[in-house]
Amino acid sequence: MPLVPAFILRRLYVKSSLHNTTGGWSFTLRNSLGSGYATGLVPLKLDEATEIPMAKTWFIDGESGDTITFDQVTDQNTFGLKMNKEIEINVDGKPLPPGEHIVYFGCIVPGIGQIGFDFTDMVPS
């Protein structure tokens, strides 16, 4: 089974996109690696310790415009990231304190299994 190294997957993260929102925080992914999809997402991890509930983590489907929470991603309702497209990942909850944070993003890809990567970025004060 092929393994995709985290240092390659880390290229999906749009640098400096981690920021607070009125209802929590978000970051952006941009696919420059090749079209693909996931049949499952795993909980985000914040600062290597806090696991974010999947029902509180969501994105807007680029084709339908629907809001989809991480726990709604299945074999029939996939998470797609087309080539050269961006998608914003949103987290409902408390905003992040200013400073450096580590976020882990993972997904389940058919034929590969679970893959993921972490990134470090600053939330401005």
Image (cartoon, rainbow, N blue to C red):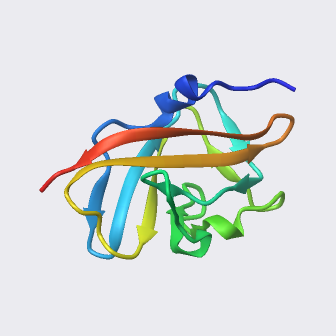
Left or right of residue 50: residue 34? right
Quadrant of the rendered structure where residue 70 is? bottom right
- How far across and down, in percent of the image, does residue 57 sit? 52, 67
Q: In which quarter of the image is the N terminus?
A: top right
Q: Nearer the viewer, residue 45 or 66?
A: 45
As drawn, the residue found furthest toward the front would be 49
**Residue 56 position within the rendered picture, expressed as x and y whole percent measured from the top left:** 52, 74
- Residue displayed at 68% across by 69% down: 71
Residue 54 in the image: above or below residue 11: below
What is the total number of numbered labels drawn onto the structure image? 0
Any part of residue 76 in sight: yes
The residue under the point 52% across, 27% down is 32
> Is residue 84 visible to us here?
no
* Position in image of residue 96 (x %, y %): 29, 63
Q: Residue at x 39, y 76 (%)?
A: 93
In-image side of 62 versus 1 (left or right): left
Q: Quadrant of residue 67?
A: bottom right
Name the image quarter holding the C terminus: bottom left
